[in-house]
Each structure stands twice: as C-alpha cells, then as structure tokens.
Amino acid sequence: MNGLPAQQKGASAIAAIIVLLILAYGVYVGIQYAPQFMESKTIDSILKKIDDDNRNDPIDNTQAAESTLVNLLQFNDLEFNSDNYTVEQRDNRITIEFTYDRKLDLIYKVLPMHYEKKLVLD
C-alpha cells in the first residue's frame, strides 16, 4: 500500500498565476513607458546636436535655430512634437524649450507625465 503523499515540491498553481500577473503588469507598464523614454532621450539628443553644431558654427537668429530643429525632428520621426516647442531670442541668446505631457496608465490610476527640456544658445 501507498503511504501518505510526500510533501509538495515546486510552486503551486496560485503562486505561478501571481508571478505571471506581476510579470504581465510590468510588461503592460513597460510597453507604455518605453516609447515615452525613447522620445525624451531623442529630444535630448536633438538639443545636444543643436548645441554642438552651435559651438562649431554659431546660430545667429531664431529662424535658423527653428529650421535646424524642425529638420532634426523630421529626421527622427518626431514631427508630432511641432506644437510642443518654442524658439525665442532673449538678450542676444536663443532659447529652445520643449514642454509636453504624456499619460502613463497604471490600471488603478492614470499618472500624468510632464516633460520640460531647455537649451540656451550663447
């Protein structure tokens, strides 16, 4: 005759489901956040490129700065950000500012994400 069953070895079905739910939630949030992160880093690199180019060949007016910015946005497939920036000249300095909002849905609440980036060209 068989004795009592041995102690359970391995995870239970409930524990496996909980682990899978946690992983699925992480993927759900990551799928939303990754494009926002990439957009933010791309805008950072665009502003850095404009700053580097300005050091080699100074930009002297807002039209030239805006033209360069628009070209770089188009090159990086970020034309949809054309309403999110301003280019102004103050005290012989050109200022480029990006301000935009995104949302991150966490299922239990929607988290507003606010991004601000600024470059001052001397």
Image: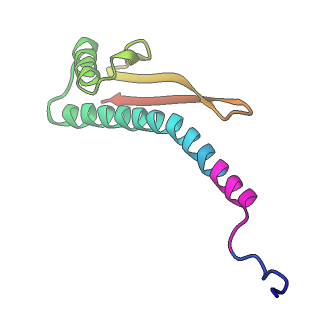
Q: Residue furthest left?
A: 57
Residues in magenta, as a range: 10-21
Numbered-mark total? 0
- At x 42% / y 12%, what residue is drawn? 83
| Magenta residue check for 37 | no
Q: Residue furthest right?
A: 4
Q: Position of residue 106 (x, y in %)?
A: 66, 35
Which corner quadrant of the image does residue 62 belong to? top left
Q: As drawn, is 26 to the left or to the right of 79?
A: right
| Magenta residue check for 17 | yes
Image quarter where the C terminus lies is top left
Which corner quadrant of the image does residue 107 belong to? top right
Query: Is residue 50 shown above or below 11?
Result: above
Q: As drawn, is 84 to the left or to the right of 89?
A: right
- At x 38% / y 23%, what residue is drawn? 95
Q: Position of residue 25 (x, y in %)?
A: 63, 44
Viewer-proximal residue among 40 and 121: 40
- At x 44% / y 23%, what residue is drawn? 98
Figure colour scheme = rainbow
Q: As drawn, is 63 to the left or to the right of 103?
A: left
Viewer-proximal residue among 63 and 16: 16
Image quarter where the N terminus lies is bottom right
- At x 37% / y 19%, what residue is drawn? 91
Which corner quadrant of the image does residue 64 belong to? top left
> Majority secondary structure of the magenta segment?
helix
Viewer-proximal residue among 23 and 97: 23
